[in-house]
Structure formats: structure tokens, C-alpha cells
Amino acid sequence: MTTTLSRPASAPAAGPPAARRAPAADPWHWSVTCASLLAVLAAASGLNGVVEPWTWLMPVLGTLLPVLLAMALTRALRLNGVLTALVGVLALIGALTAQFVPRQSILGVVPGPGTSLELRRLLAQAEETVVSQVAPVLPGAGIILIMCAALGLVAIIVDILSTTMRMPAASGLGLFTILITPAIVKPNGVGMAAFIATALAFLLLLAAAQWRENRLASGGARASSGFAARSAIIGSAALAVAVVLPMFVPGFNSGAFPQGARLNVWGNATGLNPAVTLGNDLRNPTGFGRIAYSTNSDTPLYLRAVTLEDFSGRRWEPDQRLDDRQDGVVEIGAEAGAPRTPPPGSTVFTRVTTQSYASPWLLSPYAPVGITNLNGDWAWDPANLSVLATDGGSTARQEYLVQSISADLTREGLGAIGPSDYDDVPEVFTQLPDDTPEVVRTTTSEVTDEYVNPYDKALAIQSFLRGPDFSYSVEAPVDGGYDGSGMDVMARFLESKSGYCVHYAGTMAVMARAAGIPSRVAIGYTPGSPTGGTSQGPGGIELREFVVDSRNAHAWPELYFEGVGWVQFEPTPSRGVVPTYAQQSSSPVGPRADDIDVLNPGALTDRGDRTGSAAEPSGSAADDQAGGAQDGTTPVAGALALAGVGLLALLPLILRTSRTRSRRRAVTGGEVSPGGSGAATAAWAETTEIAGDYGYRLEATDTPRSFAGRLTRDAGLTGDPATSLGRLQSAYEHEEYADHAVPSAAASTQHPAGPAALPVATLTRPVAVPRWDDVDTVTRALRQRSSWRRRIRARLFPQSLLSRFRGDARR
């Protein structure tokens, strides 16, 4: 009997194979680190347009390379993961010190005694750049320092997640944070090229991380798990969702992500940035930053926030002149250059309610002589009467009263004024930079040479810009590459003869200086729309109510006339309100009041030129019209939005169901999976993952038998479910560990020695056949023994999708 029950000589090989020993070294982490570098750089490419294109590349490379190299060397030395992160942070500090504060450093990389002071200076420079400059901003040392520091920290996080913690999928959050800035700042969002580059680099990072894991799991041997195909499918699905879904999600404005879809992360509280957002808001069809004001002014009232005077450099920005400002605004003194005997004028009272408008620059009519009921610390500038918060506050949710003086100006009175004495005003209002384009000087001469008085020259320049050769457009500057401000922008505008209010106002101010007239550019709002409401002002006077929002944002020039002061003009064709004194004698009597230099081109076709200060419908009427226009589209948009959100929520369920169906086909059809596993392995993998979804995880130390026993005990499986689990376990063990070289009974009968030579074949235990019905039986039992919360979580948020390796279920 002993002889007949003996296993053949090859039987010892049929036992479970010895676990592969992990390789002594891990050289594959270098590939993941390199992929992390490429991923961060790809995401950073979206910053082109936030700053001047590619000016950030070399400083960023000078930061990321030493940081990631130091971390990779730390891993090569097999140091602790915490030390790897610490080394990365120290390398980042050293790289930033070497690039931005070398004079204050010790040995070039260690921060020295003067480092903190220099850093504060650079950070203040960066803050000024963010607040004042037009995107793309100039690559100053401060803003580049912020970029390098932020990208360096993101690179450390991405590398730790993907290499040290071996969670490459989570590193995508770091890449997403990089894309937030261009998505908010750039008019057209991240940009398709940067978005695709980032997506591809992220997939490359996932592939490199999986390749490393396969090598580690196989002891250094080449292995494949079909990860590339799965990642391509999942990546394509995610990309499709990212492109289509934002079209229907509330909060996105217009267009498809990432081109044109801009999420308003700040809500409706917003202000008028004097340089950064003016051109961007022109292309925004949605009004925001609502402001209400009531006034007794008989003429259309412009609300002014700040002025631009320095026309040098590539970006025009306001000068805060903090050292020259006067504290307190209850009483505001005379402006520099104001005549000792002011011209006759009327007192205007204006009550401003800012609501959601938030800005450090206070809105007020020109020229204010006192402001009351204002919260916070404010100071006024004697050079231009602008009012600025000095305590970090803003205009948000303020209600204040402005008393101002409106000069009574006439064509005859202004026409009698001779050239101004430059000593009457600060030099900044008369200077022209050395790089003023020749086309500006030549055009000015052609337009103004036949006139002598400043008023006649100003009217000639205004008429030239409002003439039939010029057109209002917000697209032509973008297509032509001259969006924003700067002397080169003014030159290109004069050649193309198409632009928006910034170009018209800036060009008239520059041409006025070339003609010998001091000038500046005011930034604020046109008069807006009357609501029909009234309120009571000081002394019982009646104040008429108006509303404005971002669609009324505007820029206009102010020119200086001796004995009068600063006078407003309107060169932008068919926009704003041309004052009576600035109209040509051939023009119709009364102001043109197409009061929509709306930083909103989409509204231009809906509103024609109208006269009078009530050119726009009242606020309530406008709201009613807007609501009525949306009634027909809101249900459809809402349904599409809900459908998109529902699709996104069901994505884990869809992916999990697709994998279950694939395994069912492998079991019922006897197919073999791409990884080389058979039907029993597919059935066991599905069983262990379903158990994990219901809270019974497969531990790394579990054998099939120990896991089946623990699951039977913890889940309380009895009867058919326990029998089905036992069959699944037995089939998997036989498929995974049995000696498949043992001859079959048919083969043994043909052996030369006869059946007696291999009697074991006649006593082989029947092979357990995997059945999908067993999987369904175990699944139903687990579902019945779980709470309704656990059932929902298992279906909609299956934990098995978070498994990094499909081979975990093979234990």
C-alpha cells in the first residue's frame, strides 16, 4: 500500500512555490523620480501666460533638479522615508538661497543673517506684481521666487507620494494644485496644450510607478500586469469626463475645460483691479461686483477708483505713493495743480453701497472733498485724489457718503486756455519714456499740428480716435498679441485701429503728452443704469439711484488745463458718455449715453447707441429680463448638470461592474486573463475583493485557507454560502499550487510500465471546478449580513478600486 500511495519523484515540486525574495537593491525608483520631475514641469507649462512664457523654466529647473536628485540619492542609500522628505526640504531651501539671496547666504546655500530682510523685500515685490501688473506679468525676482518655492514643495510631495509611499495616483492632487493658478488667472483657462501635457505626464508617472512595483514583486525579473492597457482606458475616460462635464457643472462660466472654462472660486465678491483684470473682464459676459449709488448730480456720473500716470515700462500700474498720502478722508484737501481760485461748480452728494464689490481702492466721483460713514483706515493722495485703504481693508459691504465738486465747464471757457506751465503739476504727468514709438509721435503731429490751444488739440485727438477708422473690439487685441498696456501696445493699436477702452484711453493720454498736455488715465465705472428709486440725502435733497457692475468697468483719460485742473475726455467710440464740453460743434446736442464700455463684448450686439443718462434699463427691470431669458434654458441646463454629476458619482460603480463582468466571462467561458491567471483565480479575486468592499479585507499575511476561515467566522457564513466559499478556495488552491505535471489517468494507461508503475493517477482527488454561482452566493450572503450604509458604500465606493496591485488577491 505504501508503494501504491507514493507520489512520483517530481511530486515535491508540486508544493507551493517559495515566495520570491525582494531584490537587494531598488534602482527603479530613479525612473519614478524622473517621471515626477516631468509631471511637475508639464503642469508648470500652464503658467505660460501667467508670467512671460518660459521665463520661469531655468529658475524652476535650478530648483527642482537639486531637490529631486538629493531625495533620490537618499533612497539609494536606503535611508528612512522621513529623512528623504527632510533632505528634500533642506535641498529646496539651499536651492532657493543660492538663486535668490546668495549675498546674504553662508557658503552660497545656507541662509545668513540678512536673508529674512531680503526675503521680505522680494515678497513685497511679488505682492506688488500680483496686485498691479497685467497677466502675463514680468518675471521679477519676487514672483519667480514664489513660483520656485511652490513648485519645489509640490515636487517633494509628488515624489514622496509616488516613490516613498508608493501611492502614485494620489500625486495627481499635487499636479492639480499647480493648474489652479492658470485656470483662475488666464482668460482662456489652463490651455489645451498644458492640460494634455499634464495628463500624459501623469499617466507616464503611473506607468513608471507600476513598472517599478512589478520589478520589485518579481524579484527584479521582467513582469507585466496589463497595467498600460488599463491605465489607457481609465485615463481616456477621465479625460473625457474632464472635458465634457464642466460644460454642465454650475460655477463654470463658458466654454469647455480647460479652454475657456473659468471657475469663479471667489464667489461674487470682487473688485476692480486697475491693471490685471480689466482686459479679462471685457471678455467675461457675466456681470459681477454689483454697486449701487444714489446722487443728486444732473450729469452722468463716473465713479473713479485710481489713476495711472507712469507710462514707462511694459506694464502700466498705479503708484500707491504711501509715503505721500494724507490720513483721514472726512476732509480732503486740494489736489496738486488745482487752481487757487477754482472754477465755478456745484456740490454733488453721492451715497455709495458697495455690496459685493471688494477693492482696496475706494470708488468716488471726481473731485471728492470729504467722505463720511466709511469703516476702516483710509488715506488720500494729493497728486490725484485717489483713496486707498491703509489697514489692509477693502470696500466690501460699505455704505458711505461722498461730497464732491463738479466743475461747470464749457467749450468756450476751455478753448480760451493757453498751454500749461509744467511746474503746476508733478513731473510724472508730463513725462514720456525714451522708448515711445515713432508712430505715436508722428500720428500726434499729423492730428494736432494745426492747433495751438490745448483744448483744440485734445478735441482733435479725441475725434481722431472716435472716427470711422477705429472700432471697438476685445478680440483683436488678443489675436494681435497686444492685450494690456505699454508703449508697444499703443503702437500696435494705432496700426490695427481696433481695441477696447484701455487702448483708447492710454493712447489719448500718451498723444496728449506728446502734444504738450499733462495727462493720466483714470480707472473706474461708467454711470450705469438708473433703477428708478430715490433716497434722501443731506439736507433733505433727493438722490436718484443707479447700479453698476463689472460690465460698466471703464478707463478714460484726464487732461490738465491751467486754471481749471483735470478734465475728463471720452475717446472710446460708442462707449461711455462724452461730456458736453468735449463734444464737437457738429455733434448732436446732449451726451451720448451708450453707457456700456462693459468690459463685456457679448452685450454690444444687444444694446445700441442711446442718449441720456438712462441708457440702460433699471436694475430691477434688468434683473427681470435676465430672469425671463433664463427661464427657458435653466431646466435643461440643470438637468444636464445633474446628469453630469450623476455620471461622475457613478464612475466607481461603472468601473467595478466592468471588472466583475470581465471576470465572469473568464470563469463561465474558461478564458485566461491577460496576466496568466485562470478561471479559479479570477473567481477567487472577485470573492476576496467583494469581501473587502463589505469590510472583510484580505490581509497581506493571509493564505487562501486562513482568509476563508476568517471570513466564514466573522461574516457568520453557514450552509450554502460557506460551502460555496469552500469550493472557491479549493479550486483556487488547486489551480495555483497543484502539480500540473502529474499524468492523467488516460496517460498512465498508455505508459509502458502499465498502471502499476504510476498507481497515484488512479487515486488523484477530483479537481474542483470554479463556478460563478458560488461567487454570487457568497456575495448575496455578505450583502444580507451588512447594514444599508455598508451596502451603499460597497456599491458606489468600492474599496477594491483603491488596491494598487491586482496580484494582492492571489495570496
Image: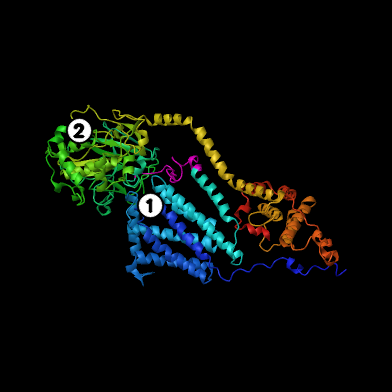
- Residue 493 located left or right of residue 170: left
Question: In the displayed structure, would residue 460 be above or below residue 230?
Answer: above
Q: Which of marks 2 and 1 is in front?
A: 1
Range of the magenta residues?
244-272
Please indicate whether residue 511 sits to the left or right of residue 372 in the image.
left
268 and 395: which one is in front? 268
* Closest to the observer, 143 or 354: 143
Q: Mark 2 points at which residue?
A: 581
Q: Where is residue 200 in the image (x, y as percent from the top left)?
A: 48, 53
Look at the numbered disc 1 and give the secondary structure of its residue.
loop
Disc 2 is placed on an element classified as helix
Asked whether 808 falls inside the magenta stretch, the response is: no
Amino acid type, label 2: Tyr
Q: How crowded is mark 2: few (under 14 residues within 10 Å), some or many (20 or more)?
A: many
Coordinates of residue 518 in the picture (x, y in percent): 18, 44
Q: Does the magenta stretch include residue 260?
A: yes
Q: In which quarter of the image is residue 213?
A: bottom right
Residue at 69% of width from left, 62% of height from top?
A: 702
> In the rendering, at what x and y percent does residue 327 appear?
28, 50
Is residue 768 left or right of 699 when viewed as pictured? right
Q: Which residue is drawn at 40% across and 30% down?
A: 622
**Gap between marks 2 and 1 measured at Cα:** 45 Å
